Amino acid sequence: MKPTGLKEHGVIWYNDGAAQPTFIPVVLHIDNPGWHDTALGDVDADGDIDMVTKVWNKDGENYHADFWRNETISLNK
C-alpha cells in the first residue's frame, strides 16, 4: 500500500489515534533501497522508540541493517 505517485521506499504509516483512524503516510527516506523487515524498540536506552530495518536488496555481496534513531530535540534553551 502506498500513496499515489510515491515510491514505497522509506514510508511508514502514522495512525492519528481517532475513533475512526486516519493513516497518514510519513516519508522517512527517499532513494532508500527498500525495507522488508522492521523491528521497533528502545535500542539506545533513551526512552524513545527506535527502528531497525533490513534492506530489500543487498549492497554488493552483503545485506545490511539500518538503525533509525528517534531523537527528541528541544527548541527551548
Image: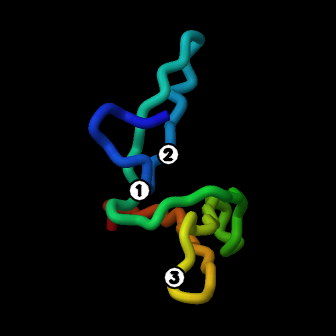
Q: Which residue is mark 1?
A: 28
Above or below for 69 versus 20: below
Mark closer to the chain start, 2 or 3: 2
In the picture, the disc for residue 43 is none
Residue occupying image coordinates x 67% and y 74%: 44
For label 3, the crowd category at 10 Å Cα-Cα, with few meaning under 14, some 14 to 19 and many 20 or more, is few
**Label 2 Cα neighbours within 10 Å, binned few <14 / some 14-19 / many ≥20:** some
Residue found at x 58% / y 73%: 67
Residue 48 position within the rendered picture, expressed as x and y whole percent measured from the top left: 62, 59
- Picture disc at residue 12: 2
Q: Position of residue 32 (x, y in %)?
A: 41, 65
Whether the residues at callouts 2 and 1 have beta carbons within 8 Å, the answer is yes
The answer to which image quadrant residue 54 occupies is bottom right
Residue labelled with disc 3: 59
Secondary structure at numbered mark 2? strand
**Mark earlier in primary sequence (1, 3):** 1
First in residue order: circle 2 vs circle 1: 2
- Colour scheme used in the picture? rainbow
